Image: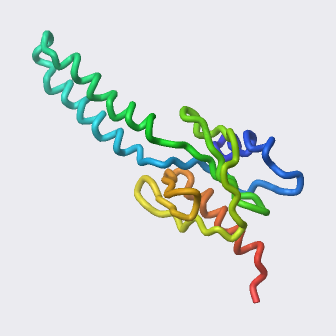
Amino acid sequence: MEFADRITENFEPHRRQSETVVAAFPAGSHNQILVTIPAAIAGIGAFVFDRSADSVVWVLVPLVSLLPVVWFMVVNRNYTVIATDERTVVARSSRFSVLQVLEPIEELPLDVQIGPASGLITYTTSALVEPLRIHRRAFDQVRRADERESEATPSN
């Protein structure tokens, strides 16, 4: 099942009777690449210092690898963005599962422009609650959310 379907399923208790979900995607407050690079460097360090088996490296490498992960888990806030045919909802999500919809925290009008989403890994948008990072896998959902506004307003 695609992540948009799972988010839509979890959004069901907060959905109005008259609205239909057009797009749904997860977003985060911090960039995960800040965790990935130090963990990768620590992993490479483990291979480099593999020659001395009784060294202190085998204690330091796991700790150094985990520090950015712990930092990321503390500072990052996960959100789900649900675009319906009537509104755009930003909801708080679980710290460990970005597909959950815990509670809606912001309701934005239909004409909010999230994209155009572009970038190598993530796209940062300021149109929502705070600057949020959207992963590349959700770019098509951002496009669908932005297109629904143009479909709703008649062109003159």
Location of residue 14 with respect to 112 vertically, above or below: above
Q: Quadrant of residue 42?
A: top left
Q: Quadrant of residue 66?
A: top left
Residue 41 is situated, as x and y percent measured from the top left of the image, at: 24, 35
Q: Which residue is found at the position 45% from the left and 34% from the top? A: 73
Residue 26 is situated, as x and y percent measured from the top left of the image, at: 58, 47
Q: Quadrant of residue 43?
A: top left
Location of residue 114 with respect to 106 vertically, above or below: below
Which residue is most to the bottom? 156
Horizontal arrangement in the rendering, residue 101 relative to residue 56 (left or right): right
Which residue is most to the right? 17
Horizontal arrangement in the rendering, residue 12 relative to residue 60 (left or right): right
Q: Which residue is found at the position 72% from the left and 67% from the top? A: 110
Quadrant holding the N terminus: top right
Horizontal arrangement in the rendering, residue 21 relative to residue 142 (left or right): right
| Circle count | 0
Quadrant holding the C terminus: bottom right
Residue 106 is situated, as x and y percent measured from the top left of the image, at: 67, 54
Q: Toward the viewer: 117 or 34?
A: 34
Q: Which residue is found at the position 15% from the left and 19% from the top? A: 50
Colour pattern: rainbow
Horizontal arrangement in the rendering, residue 122 relative to residue 58 (left or right): right
Residue 69 is situated, as x and y percent measured from the top left of the image, at: 38, 33
Location of residue 49 with respect to 148 vertically, above or below: above
Location of residue 91 with respect to 102 vertically, above or below: below
Which residue is most to the top? 54
